[in-house]
Amino acid sequence: MNLTQILERMRHDKAFSANITHWHVIETKAARYAPFPEGVDPRLLEVLGRKGIHQLYTHQAQAVDAIMQGKDTVVVTPTASGKTLCYNLPVLQSILKDPSSRALYIFPTKALSSDQVSELYEIIEGAGIDVKTYTYDGDTPPAARKAIRTAGHIVVTNPDMLHGGILPNHTKWIKLFENLRYVVIDELHTYRGVFGSHLCNLLRRLRRICAFYGSSPQFICCSATIANPKELAEAILEREVALVDDNGAPSGEKHFIFYNPPVINRQLGIRKSAVQEAQTIAGELIGNRISTIIFTKSRLQLEVMLTHLKQLVKTRLGSSDGVRGYRGGYLPTQRRAIEKSLRAGEVVGVVSTNALELGIDIGSLSACVLVGYPGTIASTWQQAGRAGRRNDVSATFLVANSSPLCQFIVQHPEYFFERPPEYGLIHPDNLYILLSHIKCAAFELPFRDGETFGGNEITEILGFLEEGGMIRHVGQTYHWSDEEFPTTAVSLRSASNENFVIIDITTPQHRVIGEMDRFATPMLLHEEAIYMHEGAQYQVEKLDWPEKKAYVRAVDVDYYTDANMDVNLRVLDIMQPELALGEEDAVDHAWGEVAVNSIVSLFKKMKLDTHENLGSGPVNLPETEMHTTAYWACLPAPEESGLTREQTQLALVGMGNLISILAPVTLMCDPRDIAILTQIRSPFTRKPTIYLYDAYPGGVGFSEKLYQMHSTLWRQALEIAKNCTCLNGCPSCVGPDSDRRVTITMLEMMLGDRQS
């Protein structure tokens, strides 16, 4: 059966269609064209003509025109709409006109930079022009680096290499910085929260070095659809940009299906496993040789699903090579091999985390299965855009899990289809982030008295660094004097730049099979954990925390492991005084700095097929600590509310569940950007308290926004609790472990709607 026949059968299958909450069809859209701008080099026109490109899509023509007028530009169109040509054409034209001209391409990942540069090579080789293009990242051989620094017309890199390899060594890159004409920033929508805040500071350092060498580059940004592309680009670049968002590319018919697994326990609001239902849908698609990508929420989900699909494919097709896994933690050579197999059509299905969400070319796929809501509207459209890239009929299945946010989305399809995608928010002047980059900037070039950084007056910060012995003030200049190399202590993507290496010791020839970041390691690589890698199972024999190595041995067992993390929070400082809100709001709330301590203390063994709990064991690992910012709200104590301690605890759980639905939607951020902790008697407030904290060191501004919209937030929570149709608590409101009536009572007390 082809995809159209499968969709038709699903639509008329009563058992399947009973679980569909919404079936959305996006009609075929024809392309809109515009001619090439005047003056484009004939060699470029000829090679593009051989590739079948005889005219531009309207958005490509608008972008090229704006760039050639010297405007900083952001191009915002869907996946596979030809954004790459928007910057390749003006950059190549500039270099052909002036061979001394240079360009810097910045992609968020090494995989994406490697993928995109191959398309650029095709144009350069096809046109027979002398434009030297190189990728400069951690995989670049040392022997090639010198040639790239002196001869590269276009240098393709990622933020991490720009931060740690290029800017600190700018004296070796004089040719680049003296002649830098264009800076291209692709996948701009990924630079939100902490990553975007770091990028803004990174570009401050870049512009400072360019100014030192006498250049002032023009910026070209490309992004998938987000609500505020112009605002985000201007926040990151700190200058005005021209917006191009009228997409002229064609698209085929797209089906978007919201599938909510059947309820198996109505009283508790428990549904059938999203992973198992997604497996069934993906299995039917792959079994009919429909090229399919399955996006999972975690490494563990990926490996569990991959194991089942490999078995299914082996049964139906005779070989399990038709299904592959793809995620961070696989070695680069392994990921490149999988990408190549996908482009060649050798793989029918791929199970991925969001590692394949970005625009890596993986060929033509027809279907996409999402195991749970990806967390944002923008990410959902980006993942769905991986299917139907060749303008044929395509389908995306969003298989809901029991999480509150996921249930909210599938039961309110109008929210997803009628509202704009999320806003990209950054907070570059976060003191933790700003201080890190001022250290790096001082190492790169001395600061002069009165010099600002990103418009910030930094004399006080420089004085603080001088007191710490990191810089010296000589005459009117601050010089770096510390022995440490400052960039090594700054991770652009997380609180830590430490990765653990995973070593397979099954055979005497030990080999590295993967890596994992420091914060995921306690959950997934503790001793006795079952680590799953491309469907194969390994037991962790030893975790060497000081040396950052995990030793694993191949096993064949019918269970996986899942760890529990205990979190404790201490208030360090109140930045906004705690306020009693009087008659309208009878609850105190505050915003301040906190220390969050977390430790993994226990793991469970779960059966692969039924997910039954087979037992548990202890985990002995050190505690981690993070300083961040938090918003907190205090509830009436039992003696004030008239509720029992047990009822107050249930209300706390219920309110925490409601906030986990509302906060990401209200802030338009990724649910992983914030975390929630409830305490029945907080050591700091001495009352029942709910804390919402930024999940990044130093905070990114989310908790402060929640503090500012305190009353609105809890009003919305009360509305959701009252309007839910469940018996007395489900994942879509207060959660199955709470009490909806008690939670409503507590919310009404908080908001002054009920007399205590």
Image: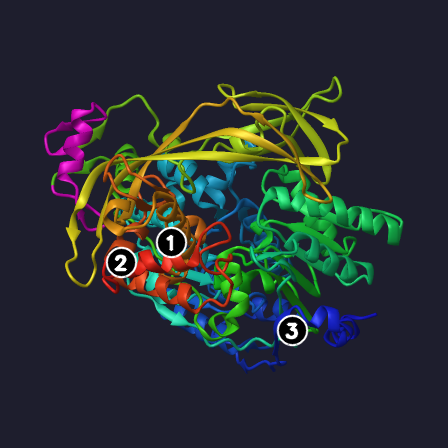
Question: Tag 2's secondary structure?
Answer: helix
Which of discs 3 and 2 lies nearer the camera? The answer is 2
Crowding around mark 2 (Cα neighbors within 10 Å: few <14, some 14 to 19, many 20+) is some
Report which residue position mark 3 lands on: 255
Q: Amino acid at mark 3?
A: His
Dot placed on the residue nearer the N-terminal end, 3 or 2: 3
Query: Given contact means CB atoms under 8 Å apart, are the residues at marks 3 and 2 in contact?
Result: no
The residue carrying pointer 3 sits among few (fewer than 14), some (14 to 19) or many (20 or more) residues within 10 Å by Cα, namely: many
Instruction: Tell me where residue 352 appears, x and y as whole percent.
Output: 64, 50
* Residue 322 on image: x %, y %: 79, 51
The residue closer to the viewer here, 245 or 701, is: 701
- The amino acid pointed to by label 2 is Met
Identity of the residue drawn at 49% across and 74% down? 414
Amino acid type at mark 1? Met
Q: Which residue is mark 2?
A: 749
Label 3 or label 1, whichever lies nearer to me, is 1
The C terminus lies in quadrant: bottom left
- Asked if the magenta segment contains residue 544, the reply would be no
The residue singled out by tag 1 in the image is 655
Q: CA distance from mark 3 to mark 1?
A: 36 Å
> To which quarter of the image does residue 512 belong?
top right
**Could you tell me residue 90's position as x and y percent?**
46, 65
Q: Is residue 709 visible?
A: no
Figure quadrant of the N terminus: bottom right
